[in-house]
Structures are given as C-alpha cells and as structure tokens.
Image (cartoon, grey):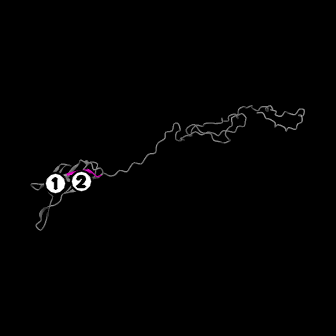
C-alpha cells in the first residue's frame, strides 16, 4: 500500500535541509489496505477452469488492492449446473455411452440338395435317398423329403410311386421325372427332380 519516491541524481552536493533521503517509504494513505506477498492474478476477464459437471465459472476480477464490494462474488465462483446441462467425458456423474455399431448384414440361408441313391422296386415303385447341406458352410442338415406321395427324413431311403403320364399315339402311360421338395427348419424349401 506504500509508495516510494525515485532516487534523486547524485550531484555531489549535500542534501537540502528537509529533503527526503535517497529512498523514502511513505506511509500508506488513510483507509488503504496494507498487503504483503500479493499473488498475481489472471488478466481481467480471463476464464477460470470449471471443476463441476456442467457448471460455469465467473472470470477472476482484476487485483485492485481494494477490499471486495459488499455482496460481490469471490474471485472464482462455481455455479450450479444448468437444468438439462451435460458435462463432457470424464465429468463426475456423467456416464459416457459408447457409440453403437451397425449390425452386420446377414446372408440368407440356402440349401444344397444331393441325391445319394435311387432304384426301382416291383409294382412301379421307386426309392431315393436325399441329402441336404448348408450352402455356405457345407454342413449336413436334417429335414423332411417329400416326393409323389412318399415322405421321410433326409439321408434315408424313401419309397414312392413312379411318376407317369399318358403320351404317344395310344396315350399309354409313360414314366416321367418326379419333382420333390426338401424342408429344413430355418431354410427356404429346396426342390429336386429324379
């Protein structure tokens, strides 16, 4: 709070009567506060880092050496969060939600049908063995085979009547290929012919 007067030039002459010494510390002005070890403060209007979640801080006022005005906030005032405000990552009380990833597209399942055995029986009967596999993995899957009135599980012999149709000049029944189906849960129905 005190002030000093500058040192007068050295003229080699004795000081005048009543003149101040080379460095004279004047007493503080009446009513002025006396401060020692004053810590420098940030420039006027410099923002102060916030500590809370979503709260704001007021800038540090300049150091004027005068006592604060009645009712004035302290140099750093942490205000409560605004309604609905959210803090950034790492803010206490705020949970970071990782970004979701889009689901991978799924490939439709398809069947591969193979006839592993067939033959003829008496009375116009025939038999067939059908195997079904996953088209993507090649894994054997189990299902139901149906063909011209006969049905049974895949991988086993299925007996059915030979398919016939009337053809030729005399319209005599002639053997013709039969079309069958293979049904497996989770797959579209596959067709085969023999």
Query: Residue at 22% across / 53% down in the picture?
Result: 114
Q: Looking at the image, which is closer to me, 15 or 91? A: 15
Specify the quadrant that holds the N terminus.
top right
Q: Magenta residues: mostly which secondary structure?
A: strand
Secondary structure under tag 2 reads strand
Residue 113: image tag: 2
What whole-number distance in Å separates the C-alpha atoms at marks 1 and 2? Answer: 14 Å
Q: Position of residue 9 (x, y in %)?
A: 85, 39
In this rendering, the answer to whether 33 lies above or below 105 is above
Secondary structure under tag 1 reads strand
Residue 118: image tag: 1
- Decide if residue 41 is on the left or right side of residue 167: right
Residue 183: image tag: none
Q: Position of residue 165 (x, y in %)?
A: 15, 62
In this picture, which residue range is highlighted in magenta?
A: 130-135
Query: Residue at 25% across / 50% down in the picture?
Result: 133
Specify the quadrant that holds the C terminus.
bottom left
């Amino acid at each position: 709070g005190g002030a000093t007067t500058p040192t007068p030039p050295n003229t080699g002459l004795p000081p005048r009567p009543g003149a101040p010494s080379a460095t004279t510390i004047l007493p503080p002005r009446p009513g002025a506060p006396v401060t020692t070890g004053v810590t420098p403060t940030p420039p006027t209007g410099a923002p102060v880092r916030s500590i809370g979640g979503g709260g704001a801080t007021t800038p540090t006022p300049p150091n004027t050496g005068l006592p604060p005005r009645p009712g004035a906030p302290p140099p750093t005032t942490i205000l409560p969060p605004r309604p609905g405000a959210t803090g950034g990552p790492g803010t206490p009380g705020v949970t970071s939600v990782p970004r979701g990833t889009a689901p991978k597209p799924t490939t439709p399942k398809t069947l591969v049908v193979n006839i592993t055995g067939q033959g003829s029986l008496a009375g116009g009967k025939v038999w067939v063995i059908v195997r079904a596999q996953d088209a993507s993995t090649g894994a054997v899957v189990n299902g139901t085979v149906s063909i011209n009135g006969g049905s049974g599980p895949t991988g086993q012999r299925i007996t059915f009547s030979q398919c016939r149709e009337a053809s030729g000049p005399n319209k005599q029944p002639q053997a013709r290929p039969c079309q069958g189906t293979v049904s497996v849960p989770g797959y579209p129905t596959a067709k085969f012919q023999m």
